[in-house]
Amino acid sequence: MRRRRASIAANPILVGAVTVLVTVTAVFLAYNANSGLPFVPSYEFKVIAPSSARLVPGNDVREGGERIGAVKEIKVVSTPEGRKAEITLNIDEASSPLPEDSRVLIRPRSTLGLKYVDLLRGESTRTLAQGDAIRVDQTSVPPELDEFFSIFDEPTREDVRTNLTTGGSGFAGRGVDLNRTLAALPQLLGDLVPVMRTLSDPETDLRGFVRELADAARVVRPVAEDLAGGFRSGAQVFEAVSRDPQALRETIAESPATLQAGIDSFGEQRPLLRQLASISDELQGTAREIRASAPTLGRALGAGTAVLPDTPAFNERLETTFSSLRELAGAPTTNLTLAGLGSTLETLNPTLRWVGPHITVCNYWNSWWTYLSDHINEQVPSGTLQRIQVKLSSPFQPNGPAVFSAKEPANGDPLPDPPTNELTGGAAFFHAQPYGRAVDEEGNADCESGQRGYPNRLTNDAVIPPQFNIATSARTPGNQGATFTGKPRVPEGQTFSAEPEGLAPKVVGTP
């Protein structure tokens, strides 16, 4: 009788050993998968960076969003520029060789600090050999979130809170005054430009004018005491007259008869004055001006009586002032500064013409400050926070903003079956309408910001195929009208620009 051959499966010890061997092999392969599977050809090169940016061995190396390798090793090396981080990258041999001008960027993979290396393949015909190094600068290593938020320390937060509180209190309830000021600024600056241009003109000789003023002060200074004495004597006369009210009343009572006598004498004086006025054109003009200015001069002399005693001390201080002013006028940079101020005003006017209607017509300035306090008043243990709502783009939308392999613009395509959960959001398409208008070319209200709708397609680019729902035109058809507290058109007298100058055809008008 033949003996039956023993089966391997019938030996429990052998089966257990094989099972343990397979398990250990699987665990080993899974543990070393980030560094590349054994016996699989790979391509290794190094990156010399200012810092490792918190990379760790095993982090992904990606190209175009696809994983092609991993970080193998990180160590510190000494270079002529100082201590640097040497990052060894191991990528699939199918992705090699790399052009010599290839670049790498260290990017965050999530908000929790996970990083990956983004490989940007170059176009050079020369390639990197095994073990060659790519040097990157600081711009390839982004700042960490904790480094960014560390600038908002307690003193900074307190200063920001103080600025917002002070600014809000200062602007609250003063919208009308601000609107009037901004409405008047273009006209004021427009009038100031020719004045500055005239002052900066060498033919104006501002330096000579200031020099002559200083000479006049110098000439008046020796007789300043005599002039002050004359005015003091006049003041004493007026003071003496005021001591006797009865005499003053009698003088006033006699004044009508005296004035009438003077009026009667004017008939006799008229021929003399006519002949005197005809002496020359200059004297005739002077006589007319004196006749019109006599009341004003009388009031000026009366007001100056009380001031003249202080004139000597003032003249002494004025001499120093005029000396400094003469030095300023003689400085070689004075005329250049005045000319630069004129150029600055000319540069600022287009900006005010564009920004002015956003404030005077659409009232955006007051609206921004009104809602700012509500926007940042979410109470937390450490103070207040900004209220925000995060909306995520669906990663399942074809060519959506969250898809790395997108080949076309986001087009609002429907989501595939099965439907995604509510956190992924809905379908999106490309929509950008910068520089919303405040008025049209005629000055009528067209407050687009915060009022216009969300068009499916609005573009003036004929190259874009019609099947794409893209909004790139800055102008929504038709006037959107005024805001709730706005005005129907630009205030009278205010210049305006319907388009920002330099970005679109300039349209300037005055209603």
Image (tube, rainbow, N blue to C red):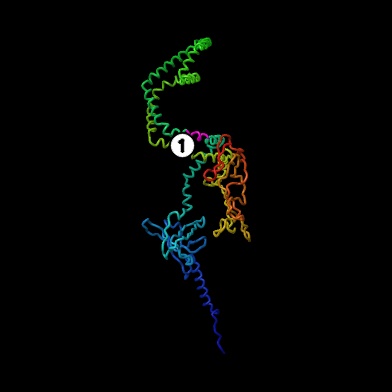
Pick the front one: 493 or 71: 493
- Left or right? Give the position of 399 relative to 92: right
The residue positioned 54% from the left and 83% from the top of the image is 6
Whether residue 491 is visible: yes
Image: 139 above or below 187: below
Query: x and y percent of residue 15 in the render?
Result: 53, 76
Mark 1 surroundings: few (<14), some (14-19) or many (≥20) residues within 10 A: many
The kind of residue on which mark 1 rests is Gly
Query: x and y percent of residue 107 in the render?
Result: 49, 57
Question: Which of the 4 quarters of the picture holds residue 353?
Answer: top right
Query: x and y percent of residue 424 in the render?
Result: 59, 56
Judged from this view, the residue extending furthest toward the bottom is: 1
Quarter in which the N terminus is drawn: bottom right
Quarter in which the C terminus is drawn: top right
Q: Main secondary structure of the magenta part?
A: helix
Q: Secondary structure at mark 1?
A: helix
Image: 28 above or below 442: below
Pick the front one: 187 or 183: 187
Query: x and y percent of residue 176 in the render?
Result: 57, 35
- Left or right? Give the position of 387 relative to 281: right
Q: Which residue is mark 1?
A: 342
Quick check: is 375 in the magenta stretch?
no
Question: Which of the 4 quarters of the picture holds residue 494?
Answer: top right
Stretch of the chain drawn in magenta: 187-194
The residue positioned 45% from the left and 13% from the top of the image is 240
Whether residue 252 is visible: no
